[in-house]
């Protein structure tokens, strides 16, 4: 992913999103890098693609995520809300960093963590 900076220069953002359709109706989304203001728009677009067509279950592997700011958390909450509305079984597999962040923010009780 390449993002244009405020100074007009392009820089590579450390974010990778890989979607795998394991079985019919089951999607695994593997995210690695940093979830922040510069990368969450890209992540949100990738998540929207992964949910079309609507699967029965989604696993979001965040083991490769080293940093997450409030915009990253907002994206994860948005995915949780969308999956709940569409009756998609959702499970997050957080890295140690994300697990600590979810505990500290009180989101570990809201988001389905595996």
Image (tube, helix red, strand yellow):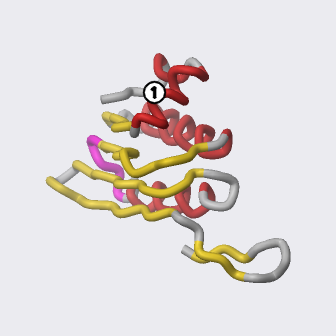
Residue drawn at 85 percent across, 77 percent down? 7
The residue lying toward the viewer, choosing from 55 and 63, is 63
Q: Is residue 103 above or below residue 90?
A: above
Q: Quadrant of the C terminus?
A: top left
The crowd level at tag 1 (other Cα within 10 Å; few <14, some 14-19, many 20+) is some
Q: Residue at x 35, y 54 (%)?
A: 30
Farthest residue, direction left:
23
* 48, 8: nearer the viewer: 8
Q: Report if residue 18 lies within the magenta region.
A: no
In magenta, the rendered stretch is 53-57
Look at the magenta stretch and give its main secondary structure. loop
Question: Residue 95 in the image: x percent, y percent?
Answer: 40, 39
**Which of the 4 image quarters holds residue 22?**
bottom left
Report the residue at 49% width, 48% height from top: 66
| Residue on which disc 1 sits | 111
Q: Is residue 77 left or right of residue 92?
A: right
Q: Residue at x 47, y 22 (%)?
A: 108
Q: Position of residue 81 (x, y in %)?
A: 52, 34
- Residue 42 position, x and y percent, is 57, 63
Looking at the picture, tell me which residue is in the foreground, 92 or 89.
92
Res 57 quadrant in image: top left
Which of the image's four quarters has the N terminus?
bottom right
Task: Give the farthest residue toward the right.
Answer: 7
- Measuring from the top left, give residue 100's x and y in whole percent: 49, 27
């Amino acid at each position: 992913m390449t993002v244009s900076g405020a100074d007009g220069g392009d820089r590579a953002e450390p974010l990778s999103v890989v979607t795998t359709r394991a079985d019919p109706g089951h999607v695994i989304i593997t995210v690695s890098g940093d979830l922040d203001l510069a990368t969450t728009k890209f992540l949100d677009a990738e998540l929207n693609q992964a949910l079309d067509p609507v699967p029965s279950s989604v696993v979001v592997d965040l083991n490769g995520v080293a940093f997450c700011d409030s915009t990253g958390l907002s994206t994860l909450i948005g995915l949780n809300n969308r999956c709940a509305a569409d009756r998609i079984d959702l499970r997050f597999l957080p890295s140690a960093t994300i697990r600590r962040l979810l505990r500290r923010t009180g989101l570990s009780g809201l988001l389905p963590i595996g």
